Image (tube, rainbow, N blue to C red):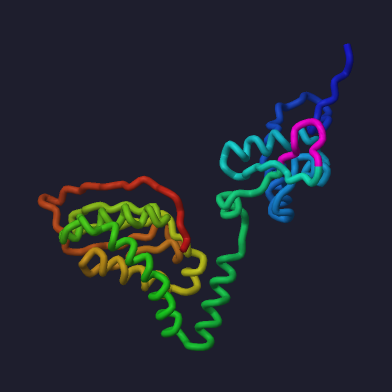
């Protein structure tokens, strides 16, 4: 019986353990190389990473299925030879968003510069301007919510979830409560609480009631919790509306 070489699998001593050929480390290396090159064929990627084209294609097929890469025929000059044309692969926008980036560091540096030039008031003004578009989009989404603060809180939770905040609204004996399970700017807001303050003011205006922030992710709490006083529930009965998480937007 002939020995059949195993492609892309290291030789190990002792009992063999099944290894996923689509391991995350190799996929990360493929993604990083596509980010550097812009586009590449499976052969080019394999040569760079020391893997066979067949091994690389397994990764690329999986990434295609998940919407992380796109493919197209490689442009050719002159008459095309025999065989299938080579395909070029490139990262999609979704894949690029998932890669590590330095946006938080850049935003913090920009806010530090604003603070140095104009002080805390300038930072607050900037924060207010940043959430103005968010307020406008949420207000549009809440157009049919009516005037009841609790109904508006529930509509706001749904609108915030669409913005990436994974929000939920609930009614409790002492009033209403709005919880945000995610904060797209938590790392920056930890240094500049003006961002949280501006967001709290937006919540107050949209709900149409005075609100009080009880906890924030930026301050190390697990959830951003905002209390909406004055929404009385007969008999102290508690109801909860949980909104499913959708795509994160960090505009």
The quarter of the rendered structure image containing the N terminus is top right
Seen at 37% across and 53% down, the residue is 161
Residue 14 is left or right of residue 187, and the answer is right
Magenta highlight range: 79-87
Residue 207 in picture, x, y percent from top left:
24, 63
Residue 14 appears in which quarter of the rendering?
top right
Name the one closer to the observer, 12 or 123: 123
Residue 135 is situated, as x and y percent measured from the top left of the image, at: 33, 66
**In the displayed structure image, the side of residue 30 where residue 243 appears, left or right:** left
What's the residue at 55%, 77% (across, down)?
Answer: 110
Residue 218 sits inside the magenta stretch: no
User: In the picture shown, does residue 21 fall above or below 219?
Assistant: above
- Residue at position x 71%, y 35% in the image: 57
Q: Residue furthest top?
A: 1
Out of 221 and 166, give the one closest to the viewer. 166
Q: Position of residue 34 (x, y in %)?
A: 70, 50
């Amino acid at each position: 019986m002939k020995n059949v070489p195993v492609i892309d699998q290291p030789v190990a001593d002792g009992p063999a353990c099944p290894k996923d050929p689509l391991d995350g480390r190799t996929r990360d290396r493929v993604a990083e190389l596509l980010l550097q090159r812009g586009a590449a064929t499976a052969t080019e990627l394999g040569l760079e990473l020391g893997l066979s084209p067949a091994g690389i294609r397994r990764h690329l097929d999986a990434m295609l299925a998940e919407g992380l890469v796109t493919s197209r025929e490689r442009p050719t000059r002159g008459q095309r030879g025999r065989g299938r044309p080579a395909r070029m692969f490139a990262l999609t926008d979704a894949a690029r968003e998932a890669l590590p980036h330095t946006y938080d560091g850049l935003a913090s540096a920009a806010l530090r510069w604003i603070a140095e030039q104009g002080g805390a008031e300038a930072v607050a003004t900037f924060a207010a301007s940043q959430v103005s578009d968010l307020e406008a989009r949420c207000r549009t989404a809440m157009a049919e919510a009516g005037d009841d603060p609790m109904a508006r809180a529930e509509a706001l939770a749904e609108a915030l979830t669409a913005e990436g905040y994974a929000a939920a609204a609930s009614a409790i004996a002492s009033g209403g409560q709005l919880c945000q399970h995610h904060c797209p700017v938590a790392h920056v807001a930890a240094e500049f609480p003006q961002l949280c303050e501006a967001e709290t003011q937006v919540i107050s205006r949209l709900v149409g009631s005075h609100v009080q922030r009880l906890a924030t992710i930026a301050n190390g709490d697990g959830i951003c919790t905002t209390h909406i006083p004055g929404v009385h529930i007969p008999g102290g009965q508690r109801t909860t509306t949980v909104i499913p998480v959708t795509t994160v937007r960090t505009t």
